[in-house]
């Protein structure tokens, strides 16, 4: 079953064309990792999928329905397609628990008790239940990102987008966040992950997309893309990364 389908997506900033005629889809249960150099369009693609950037042209479908329209429809869509940002985007004036409860109360109109129970469930899942009364300023980067993942999960999304979830973390904290994402992958959650962690992309994705200069240069199963890439640009990129 196709969850998201992108057709002829273009995005320009002024005269600079960041995304050029992008076509791809993701099926239920897939974990797609998007790799590529800085400036290749990876994060812009994710931001277009979440409607944080307005596409210049092209179509994005969620199931059978094209996304966009009123703010109400956009909010409903974002409840089904969650996003985890590289900079956490937690509310600094709220506790960990309040951060997790806010969206499900406001958008999904859950009762306080229900929002509380669901938030605790997902904070336990990411190992952050002991910190429910802490403010973000009291947490490490890895802990903040695990709270951000729990917050996204409280919406019980059908698809979860990750925009370089470990790029703002100290190296020793990367593993704790990647292990949470690996667990979600094992449980069959549909995910699109922009990442520069090559070993993670190779081990976790069901399909890896290599983006280069605003186009999808190659898309394949990781065991093929990482060992025998067909596109010379993919080969050059991976040789820099794997040997670097």
Image: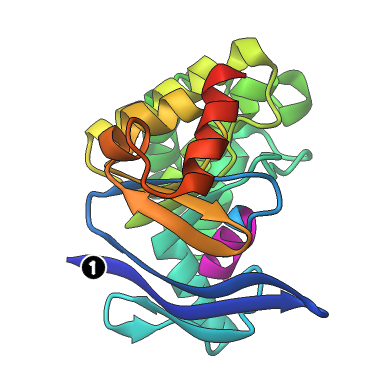
Counting labels gives 1
Quadrant occupied by the N terminus: bottom left
Q: Between 117 and 241, which is closer to the camera in this rendering?
A: 241
In front of the other: 241 or 64: 241
Please name the residue shown 68% across and 24% down the image.
169
Mark 1 is surrounded, within 10 Å at the Cα level, by few (under 14), some (14 to 19) or many (20 or more) other residues, namely some
Secondary structure at badge 1 equals strand
The quarter of the image holding the C terminus is top right
* Residue sitting at x 47%, y 57%: 217
How is the protein colored in the picture? rainbow
Q: Main secondary structure of the magenta part?
A: helix
Q: Quadrant of residue 57?
A: bottom right
Q: Which residues are magenta?
A: 43-51
Residue 50 is inside the magenta segment? yes
Q: Is residue 158 left or right of residue 194?
A: left
The outermost residue toward the left is 1
Could you tell me residue 133's position as x and y percent? 63, 25
| Residue located beneath label 1 in the image | 2
Query: Residue 79 in the image: x percent, y percent?
Result: 45, 63
The residue lying at 67 percent from left, 33 percent from top is: 95
Relative to 6, say whether 222 is above or below.
above
Reply yes or no: does residue 24 show up in magenta: no
Which residue occupies the foreground of this view, 45 or 124?
45
For the point 51% across and 33% down, the residue is 238
């Amino acid at each position: 079953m196709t969850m998201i389908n992108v057709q002829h997506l273009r995005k320009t900033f002024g005269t600079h064309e960041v995304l050029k005629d992008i076509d791809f889809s993701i099926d239920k249960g897939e974990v797609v990792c998007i790799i590529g150099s800085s400036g290749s369009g990876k994060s812009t693609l994710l931001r277009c999928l979440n409607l944080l950037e307005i596409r210049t042209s092209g179509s994005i479908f969620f199931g059978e329905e094209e996304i966009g329209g009123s703010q109400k429809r956009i909010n409903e869509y974002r409840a089904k397609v969650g996003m985890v940002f590289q900079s956490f985007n937690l509310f600094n004036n709220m506790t960990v628990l309040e951060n997790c409860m806010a969206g499900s109360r406001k958008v999904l109109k859950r009762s306080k008790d229900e929002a509380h129970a669901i938030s605790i469930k997902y904070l336990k899942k990411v190992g952050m239940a002991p910190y429910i009364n802490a403010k973000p300023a009291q947490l490490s980067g890895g802990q903040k990102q695990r709270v951000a993942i729990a917050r996204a999960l409280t919406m019980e999304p059908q698809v979860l987008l990750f925009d370089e979830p470990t790029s703002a973390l100290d190296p020793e904290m990367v593993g704790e966040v990647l292990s949470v994402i690996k667990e979600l992958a094992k449980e069959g959650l549909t995910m699109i992950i922009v990442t520069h962690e090559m070993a993670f992309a190779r081990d976790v994705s069901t399909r890896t997309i290599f983006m280069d200069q605003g186009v999808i240069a190659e898309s394949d199963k990781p065991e093929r893309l990482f060992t025998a890439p067909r596109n010379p640009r993919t080969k050059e990129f991976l040789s820099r990364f794997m040997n670097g």
